[in-house]
Amino acid sequence: MNIRETLIQKATNVRPQAYAPYSNFAVGAALITHDGEIFTGVNFENASFGLTICAERNAIGTMVTAAQKSIKALAVATENGVSPCGACRQVMVEFAIDDYPIYIVNTTTGAVQETSVQQMLPLGFDSSQLPRDNG
Ligand code: THU
């Protein structure tokens, strides 16, 4: 299986692990790093709603925990193929060495929309814009 199909399958398969008792909206994410490691994540909510963590940021946090920092591709799976929120887009940019593909999966129809991190956050803020090198 190629990277695209692998990520689509992993994001779809992890989605039922979501902890989403308030929204009932389960999201699964899977990413591969340039080292070829795959990490997955699901959204997990809280009774204090604003503490919710999206699936994409959960997968990225797991990647960082494993000392990985560069995303090669990412897939996000939902029942209706929604695209990543603004906060997640910003976090996705943080770990981009180059533009990379994003696969947006509709698990009901099987449709996959392919976009990229640059397309999702044009003119995004990144560390190169800081007045001094903090990276
Ligand atoms: N959610 C994600 O996990 N990723 C997204 O890209 C959009 C929204 C979650 C957050 C919350 O648990 C639920 O979906 C409804 O907003």
Image: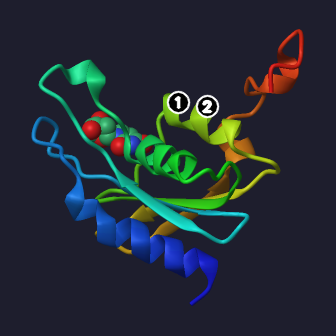
Distance in Å between CA atoms under marks 2 and 1: 6 Å
Q: Position of residue 20 (x, y in %)?
A: 17, 43
Is the distance from the Cβ of mark 1 to the nearest ligand 1 atom less than 8 Å?
no
Q: Residues within 10 Å of mark 2 (few under 14, many from 20)?
A: some
Label annotation for residue 86: 1
Task: Look at label 1 and name its amino acid.
Answer: Gly
| Above-or-below relation of 31 to 45 | below
Label annotation for residue 90: 2
| Above-or-below relation of 13 to 44 | below
Is the distance from the Cβ of mark 2 to the nearest ligand 1 atom less than 8 Å?
no
Along the line of sight, the residue nearer the viewer: 40 or 80: 40
Label annotation for residue 21: none
**Callout 1 secondary element:** helix
Q: Position of residue 112 (x, y in %)?
A: 50, 68
Q: Please report the residue visible at 30 percent of the width from the left and 45 percent of the height from the top.
A: 43
| Residue 3 left/right relative to 119 | left
Colour treatment of the image? rainbow
| Residue 6 left/right relative to 124 | left
Q: Position of residue 9 (x, y in %)?
A: 42, 76
Residue contact between numbered discs 2 and 1, judged by CB atoms under 8 Å: yes
Task: Look at label 2 and name its amino acid.
Answer: Gln
Q: Please report the residue visible at 25 percent of the width from the left and 41 percent of the height from the top.
A: 44
Q: Residues within 10 Å of mark 1 (few under 14, many from 20)?
A: few
Q: Please report the residue visible at 65 percent of the width from the left and 56 percent of the height from the top.
A: 115
Along the line of sight, the residue nearer the viewer: 116 or 74: 74
Q: Position of residue 118 (x, y in %)?
A: 74, 43
The quarter of the rendered structure image containing the C terminus is top right
The quarter of the rendered structure image containing the N terminus is bottom right
